[in-house]
Image (tube, helix red, strand yellow):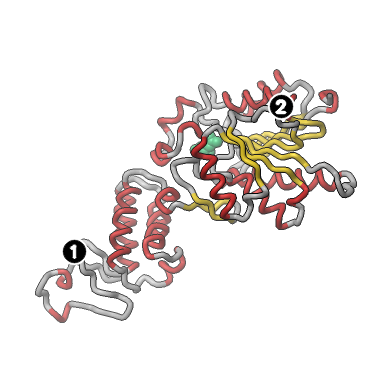
């Protein structure tokens, strides 16, 4: 590593101190502040982000340096000796300053990986969380199970699936991509809803980017739009953070739309409203998969007992062992 700021940065500095190597163009701006190599830039960024309180300073810095030079983290780590072009140094300075102020790395890069796919993300919608991959995995296996449970001749009705509160559309796209890989995407009718017009705009962009614009219908609606026949599968990652906890979330969350996080007093306000719609919105033998927050399983069980008597309720835990996805199966008695 070759931190700059020594004599190379001083006009008229001792010539012997200036190191120039291929791929390391001399910085034209203010070299006293500009690290000369990726390695130096990385070290500088890590130090600044640690100081600003990020507990993922190294990862953040690797991602931001890589983004500034247009490569990936591996490229940065494998080639610390490569020079940092001035335009990249400028970009990096902006990215690090934004991260120091608490902005999530995903918004700075404009991209977040979810379920092995890259999604465009910005302040129009929540950044997809790794926890939510569980919702996609269970959803995909329920679709496969439903499609294989009974013989389906040509002309069979497609399985009706809805992603309620789709946000960046990560859940619906990841589900559709998984079904496309299994060549059963044509067997489902997939609707994605959101109350936010901004989120839907981003959702449509992401669906198009994954070649799924024609595979997903979109509707702006508070939970479910009127006039839709009942569904076979309802997926939802609704806002579930208790309002009182919002100020205690990491500062990064303050850059996300609070509409996508704020779940009311106990966090379950939106989820409960959806439960109330399920008797009409889910047909037998249908399933609803609802993501919930840590410690909200008891509250969800109480709400389900009240509005969905006789329905089967199962919780699926995330990798941390926290009940994360509630699965509700419409009871046969509820069949209308
Ligand atoms: N898991 C998110 C968080 O804790 C919340 C997502 C949501 O409300 N659906 O920040």
Tag 1 secondary structure: loop
Quarter where residue 20 is shown:
bottom left
Q: Is residue 173 visible?
A: yes
Q: Which residue corresponds to the image point at 41% horizontal and 62% vertical from the top-left? A: 66
Quarter where residue 334 is shown:
top right
Q: Which residue corresponds to the image point at 69% horizontal and 43% vertical from the top-left? A: 190
Q: Is residue 47 above or below residue 4?
A: above
Marks 2 and 1, Cα distance to the nearest angstrom?
62 Å
Q: Please tell me the numbered disc located at residue 276.
A: none
Which corner quadrant holds the N terminus?
bottom left
Earlier along the polypeptide chain: callout 2 or callout 1?
A: 1
Q: Is residue 321 above or below residue 89?
A: above
Q: Which residue is mark 2?
A: 278
In the rendering, at what x and y percent does residue 154 appear?
87, 49
Few, some or many residues within 10 Å of mark 2 (<14, 14–19, 20+): many
Tag 2 secondary structure: helix
Label 2 beta carbon less than 8 Å to ligand 1: no
Q: Which residue is mark 1?
A: 30
Few, some or many residues within 10 Å of mark 1 (<14, 14–19, 20+): few
């Amino acid at each position: 590593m070759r931190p700059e700021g020594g004599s190379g940065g001083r006009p008229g500095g001792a010539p012997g101190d200036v190191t120039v190597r291929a791929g390391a163009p001399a910085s034209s701006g203010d070299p006293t502040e500009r690290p000369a190599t990726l390695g130096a830039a990385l070290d500088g960024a890590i130090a600044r982000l640690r100081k600003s309180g990020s507990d993922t300073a190294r990862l953040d810095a690797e991602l931001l340096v890589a983004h500034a030079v247009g490569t990936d983290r591996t490229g940065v780590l494998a080639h610390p000796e490569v020079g940092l072009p001035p335009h990249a140094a400028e970009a990096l300075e902006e990215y690090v300053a934004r991260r120091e102020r608490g902005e999530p790395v995903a918004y700075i890069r404009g991209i977040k990986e979810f379920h092995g796919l890259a999604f465009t993300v910005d302040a129009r919608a929540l950044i997809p969380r790794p926890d939510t991959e569980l919702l996609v995995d269970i959803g995909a296996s329920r679709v496969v199970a439903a499609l294989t449970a009974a013989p389906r001749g040509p002309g069979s009705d497609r399985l009706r699936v809805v992603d309620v509160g789709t946000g960046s559309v990560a859940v619906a796209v990841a589900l559709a991509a998984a079904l496309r890989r299994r060549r059963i995407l044509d067997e489902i009718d997939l609707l994605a809803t959101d109350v936010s017009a901004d989120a839907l705009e981003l959702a449509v962009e992401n669906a198009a980017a994954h070649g799924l614009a024609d595979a997903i219908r979109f509707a702006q609606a508070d939970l479910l739009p009127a006039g839709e026949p009942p569904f076979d599968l309802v997926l939802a990652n609704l806002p579930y953070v208790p309002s009182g906890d919002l100020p205690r979330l990491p500062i990064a969350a303050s850059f996300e739309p609070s509409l996508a996080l704020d779940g009311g007093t106990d966090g379950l306000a939106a989820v409960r409203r959806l439960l109330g719609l399920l008797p009409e919105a889910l047909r037998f033998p249908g399933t609803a998969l609802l993501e919930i927050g840590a410690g909200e399983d008891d509250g969800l069980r109480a709400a389900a007992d009240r509005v969905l008597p006789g329905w089967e309720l199962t919780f699926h835990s995330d990798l941390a062992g926290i009940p994360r996805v509630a699965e509700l199966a419409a009871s046969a008695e509820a069949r209308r």
